[in-house]
Amino acid sequence: RETGIQRKRQRDSKGRSILPCLPVMLQLGDSVSIPCLATDPALVNLRLETCKGRALAPGLQYSATLEAGVTIYSTEKAFEGCYVCSGQLGEAEVRSGRYDLTVRPGEDIGCASQVASASHILAENFTHVRSAVLRIKAVLAQDAGRYQCEALNEKGASTKSVWLEVYAKGFIHVRPVENSTIKVRSGESLSLVVSMEAYPKPNNFTWNFMGQALANTTDHVITTDNHSHSYSSELRLVRLKMAEGGVYTFYASNGDATVNQSFTVFVISKVTHALFTPLLIGSVSAATVLCLVLVVLFYKYLQKPKYQIQWKVIEGIHGNNYVYIDPTQLPYDNQWEFPRDKLRFGKTLGSGAFGKVVEATAYGLSKADSVMTVAVKMLKPSAHATEKEALMSELKVLSYLGNHMNIVNLLGACTVGGPTLVITEFCCFGDLLNFLRRKRETFFSSKMEDDCYYRNILRHSNPGSDGRNGYMVMNPSGTDPSPCTSSSERRRSLRKGKPDYDEDVTSQMLQEDSLSLDTEDLLSFSYQVAKGMDFLATKNARLPVKWMSLESIFECVYTFESDVWSYGILLWEIFSLGNSPYPGMPVDSKFYKLIKEGYRMDAPDFAPSEMYQIMRSCWDADPCQRPPFRKIVERIEKQLSDTTKHVGEPQTSRSITNT
């Protein structure tokens, strides 16, 4: 401090003492005091000077006192500039600090008043409007107050008033916020809002984060709104991250005032609720199980058995390649049509996914007055168009094959006026393998004596057995053998292919079902199956076989010799009384290796040595060394002839067809 006039000193970057420049702002026409106060009563000649020593502006009037400093009256725009106070202290001249004077002219204001008076003289409404405007240029502080507009006419008076506030300096008043410290979870969004009243309008709104200005982006959305002299600014933080926690500061200024408002934001990590984790795990587990169930159901649907044609017709053979005829293209002879009303249905013999077989009585099938038990194959109501087409194709194939005593023959069909019905022979003993399994306990093997003849040791009757569970060959016409004809004679007639059985013979054979089996019966069954497969070979038809040959397994080659291999497997099943081939051996890589290396099944318990030799010849690794079906038929027929020739008592045989 220096004796004389009070002022403050500052130091520049080089440590030199300088006097600061103090700003002084006022409205045009106002008076202003420059606070250059004397600190020593001995100070005399206090006066106002410009900083550069120039003369004062024309018209500038001021007064100077040691107590109040310098007062300038009726300021004008020309008075702006830098001023200092100086005085005489003894022999020395002292100076105050610098003052920067800024004179702001007042704003213009206009006040308009309108007067409306309705005329009651004219027939139509007419409004006469008069306007009065009060305009004040360069508003001064003394212009503040209430202004009233008054209108008078003969009807009376009307007044309207307005209050004018004059501010010497602009302002910004920020409304206080409820909470400036905020906690938010990571990933959530947050809005920071600052509201204020300001005059004049703020010309700058900014948001800073930790001292860095924020731009308006998708992650930091800044919006501003105003109504009259009220303003608001919002900073929306979208999906906050952990790194976005910190201090957010809002700045606003209008030239006269500058304000700021800070918010401290803490971003905390998400806390997994104790209930949420089991719920999420349960939902995911349930969804996984549901997906697995859907996959399994879809797989089961794909694996659902389709109705397939049981026969294929070969048009030509080129080596081991077969050219098949599409069964749907085969012709159908309407001579096979049989009236529906002449069928009387009985019990269901069997059913599958799409079809079923029903026992029925046909009236007038072979003769006008004949009555015959037949089997009728039909589709279930749930069958689709593809299954219907497949059944019709099977009917065409059966009609193409024609009749043979060793296969289940077609007797008729119903294709018009309703669902397709395929009428075939009725096999009262069912399929061969199940028949053998039913008779296993009552089977007695014939023993080889010194003369090498087959002989039955004993027979027992089993009145409780019932064989009417399947099919038996029943031809509609032919020579009717006498019921008194012996079983051996009937067996010989079978080999010669002469007689067919009618209902009377069927009844007798049903009674014979109670008898036990012997080796000769097994030979007879083998003979009939061989004859049937030989017939199919002559018809260029392919019967689906149960077991595959070596070339079929490893080379996907299917020939007539492959069927001979499969027939050998069937012989093994017959003479084992329905056992499954390769007992106890799972079908795996080891099984395939054994078969390829030459492993073959041992002789079944009830097979004569000659029959086992036939089986082994059927299983020859070289397809060309396997016997054809005609040779197999001859060999089995010879065994049957020898057996029948040397049997001491009448033998009973059964005619079963394996289809």
Image: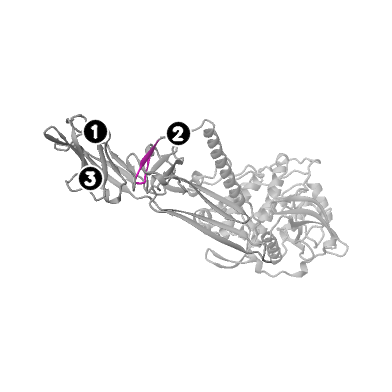
Looking at the rendered structure, the secondary structure element under dot 3 is strand
Give the residue at x 64% y 52%: 305
Q: Does the magenta stretch include residue 262?
A: yes
Left or right of 364 on screen, residue 43: left
Q: Does the magenta stretch include residue 609?
A: no
Q: Name the residue type under label 3.
A: Cys
| Number of on-image labels | 3
- Looking at the rendered structure, which numbered label has been put on residue 82? 3
Q: Can residue 70 be seen in this view?
A: yes
Residue placed under numbered mark 1 in the picture: 66
Residue 348 vs 130, above or below: the answer is: above
Left or right of 276 on screen, residue 263: left
User: Magenta residues?
Assistant: 249-263
In front: label 2 or label 3: 3
Q: Where is residue 54 in the image (x, y as percent from the top left)?
A: 18, 48
Give the CA distance from mark 1 to mark 2: 50 Å
Residue 83 vs 636, above or below: the answer is: above
Give 314 or 649, whichever is nearer the viewer: 314
Which badge, 3 or 1, is on the more N-terminal residue? 1
Q: Where is residue 154 in the image (x, y as percent from the top left)?
A: 62, 56
Residue placed under numbered mark 2 in the picture: 179
Q: Where is residue 323 in the image (x, y as percent from the top left)?
A: 57, 67
Give the CA distance from mark 2 to mark 3: 45 Å
Hey, which quadrant is residue 233 in on the image? Answer: top left
Secondary structure predominantly adopted by residues drawn in magenta: strand
Q: Can residue 653 be seen in this view?
A: no
Q: Name the residue type under label 2.
A: Asn
Neighbourhood count class around disc 1 (C-alpha, 10 Å): few under 14, some 14–19, many 20 upward: some
Looking at the rendered structure, the secondary structure element under dot 2 is loop
The chosen color scheme is one colour
Left or right of 238 on screen, residue 543: right
